[in-house]
Image: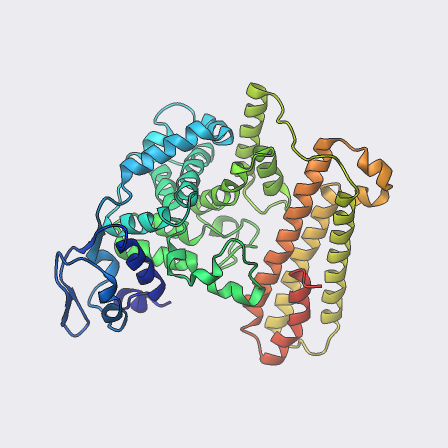
Amino acid sequence: MSDELLINSVNKHYLDKVMNLAEEKDIKATEDIFDARGMKLVAKGAKISRSLQERLIMRRLSKPFESSIAVDSGVDVDMISVEAQRIADTFEPIRAMLGLAGNGTSPVQLLSQIEFGSAMSTMLTIIERGGQTALQHSVMVSLISICLARKFGLSSKDQMVVALAGLLHDIGELYIDPEYLHSNRRLYPHEWRHVVVHPRIGQMLIQGLENYPPSVAQAVFEHHERFDGGGYPRQISGSQISAAGQVISVAEMISGILTNQDQPLNRAVLALKIIPGEHAHELVSAVSAAMQKAREENGPAAADSGTPTGEERQQVQSLYEHIDAVLQEEQKLQESPGLRSKKASQLLSDVNRRTNNIQRAFSSTGLDVCLAESVCIFESRSVDILFETKVATREIEWRLRDVARDLSLQASALEAHEAEAFQPLIALLDGQH
């Protein structure tokens, strides 16, 4: 999606969501809407309805459609504040994170001070209509981001930047075909290209529709980057990622984990530590500090892992074999005469580096010890250790799939025969074996 396309054309997926919302709430044109030739398509004050959909989607507009409409009784700062307080009152892990914020303006109060225009209000209203936890996720990322920003030593100004970026980080998904966003659908690596663009779309929307500091749009653009270079869409690393972007990246990653009923803070810490260097040390330490504070105040969390069985050991064994098979396939490719270009060789080298990091994570988490134990001994291990085994196994499997997605995207830019040579490795990384 180019900047020009965003400004002059109406995205069909976003427009469809607007039309769905218009069936529940009044949406009106805040000004006359003209096409690029100066023909008036919609008069100021007119209600937006399905009857206008074809007219709008077929024309290039003189200015963004998003800036020319407003929803009646849409999501506003008061609703955001109420949701933030509900989250703070309801989720113990979030209360533990809020405890790190220190004195001064609370994160909930800071959220009550944000400002956004009608375009963002409409988008947040669509998100709020998208499911029971959709707006909750956006507000939760914002709250966690504020807490982490303070522990990271960011200024008051930058705390407001992460508050805004956290709230708006997923608006780009409104412009993606919903078929690729269903939570119950597994995306194959080649389909990932439809989703990977959403941080860039979000950045462009904020730049074009709000008068925010550029750092807000940048943080949204970077919210899936990783400190070790394993994120997307640019695979940048370290200080190449803004401090606000690093904060949003961690907050977004752990927000879903913190709503889990089974030791959420423990899960979050394990997920952040599974690949050393994936996130800035200071941010990982901040989450660890929240977990320690919660333990001191409430005692150790009770694990809900059920009765230990041999299933955990089998999962560890399967994961070990999976990693080993990937490394063997990478070795075959390294010896293959088909990958001759410098770009293909570098890509394979990067993938091999990440796979070796994953293999080291397998060992450093203690999973390799499980392989040497008999089933009887494994089943006698403490519930806490079994809990960590489950979390580590799941997280490492996800990291392998992340590598598959990145490889699929980058291999598509190679010569056809080189791209084809990578396909067995991509399928193997993704678990299609």
**Position of residue 233 measured from the top left corner of the image (x, y, whole percent):** 48, 59
Q: Is residue 123 found left or right of 238 in the rendered image? A: left
Q: Classify residue 103 by image quadrant.
A: top left
Name which residue lies at 52% across and 52% down: 237
- Residue in the picture at 73% in, 52% down: 319
- Residue 139 spot, x, y in % from top left: 39, 40
Placement of 277 over or under 104, stated as above or below: below
User: Which quadrant of the figure has residue 52?
Assistant: bottom left
**Viewer-proximal residue, 282 or 405?**
405
Asked if one can make out residue 107 in the rendered structure from this viewpoint, the answer is no
How many numbered discs sit on the rendered protein? 0
Which quadrant is home to the C terminus? bottom right
* Residue 288 vs residue 129, the one in the foreground: 129
Quick check: 101 left or right of 376? left
Taking 215 as reference, is 7 left or right?
A: left
Q: Position of residue 297 (x, y in %)?
A: 55, 19
